[in-house]
Amino acid sequence: MIETLTGITLLQLATIWGIVFVAGFVRGLTGVGLAVVLVPLINLVLPPERTVLLAVLIGCLAGLMGYRSAWRNVDRPLVLTITVATIAATPLGLLLLFSTPEDVARLAIAAIAMLAFIVMIAPRAPLPPQGKLPAILTGLLTGLIGAFAAIPGPPVIFYFVRKGVPAAVTRDALIVIFLWAPLAVALLALALGKLDWRLAGLALACFLPLAGGNALGTRFFGKVPERQWRVLVVALIAVSAIGAVFRIV
């Protein structure tokens, strides 16, 4: 029954559920890290193309959680600028995904996961760069790697996650952007005939662990010191990236 509905074995499904729960927890706690944790680890179970498309669908489900309250609190002109640029770069990212050999795609996904780890620990100014150009470039890079690897995080994490930006501001901005980024990818993939009912069934089967992890993370948001959750996210990203590298080796 499970194999008929999702196209994978019960053991694979249980493994994916565990990964989704942990990724959902990180997302609820910080607003970031869902795809960065999700994709490299699920890529150990599924081929790259299906991993990316599954993560995109899960990202669409996650994006609905907390979106309304987040939208009320964001800098709307800034977030809209990044989001529009993200959507504009989505077709190129998908084109790269569908034309890249499987082994090369695995290597690229691992590299992007490592990039996310480096971005989280890299020193930078306490506030984001001013002006529209940095925001547009951030959006274009987000759309490109979000469509190619379903990991839209590194550019927007680098832009928003700074000492001078309150954690709540960062979290709300990323929640809004991370709804539209995977939704744009999903709609384009659907138009290209790359999504199928088994993949949709697998994404829906992941909703409960996703919602449970997200709810648990949201419960601890604001109660865990920012320094500690940053360390947690960096550690999980590092584990995901290392796992992806070992899978390639």
Image (cartoon, rainbow, N blue to C red):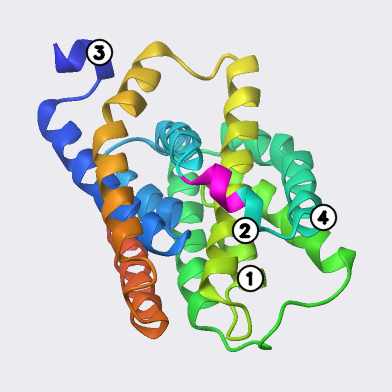
- Please tell me whether mark 3 or mark 4 is closer to you in this view: 4
Query: What amino acid type should be assigned to the residue bearing mark 4?
Result: Pro
Marks 3 and 4 close (CB-CB < 8 Å) = no
Marks 1 and 2 close (CB-CB < 8 Å) = yes
Going by the image, does 77 lie left or right of 106? Answer: right
Residue 188 image position (x, y, % from top left): 65, 25
Residue at image coords 31%, 41%: 211
Q: Is residue 67 magenta?
A: yes
How far apart are the two marked residues, 2 and 4, measured between alpha carbons?
11 Å
Which residue in the structure is indicated by mark 4?
77
Query: What amino acid type should be assigned to the residue bearing mark 1?
Result: Phe
Which residue in the structure is indicated by mark 1?
160
Residue extent of the magenta highlight: 66-70
Sequence-first tag of 3 and 1: 3
Element carrying mark 2: helix
Which residue in the structure is indicated by mark 3?
5
Query: What amino acid type should be assigned to the residue bearing mark 2?
Result: Ala
Above or below, comparing residue 246 to residue 11 in the picture? below
Sequence-first tag of 4 and 1: 4
How far apart are the two marked residues, 1 and 2, measured between alpha carbons?
8 Å
Q: Nearer the viewer, residue 63 or 51?
A: 63
Element carrying mark 4: helix
Query: What amino acid type should be assigned to the residue bearing mark 3?
Result: Leu
Q: Nearer the viewer, residue 128 or 1?
A: 128
Residue at image coords 18%, 16%: 3
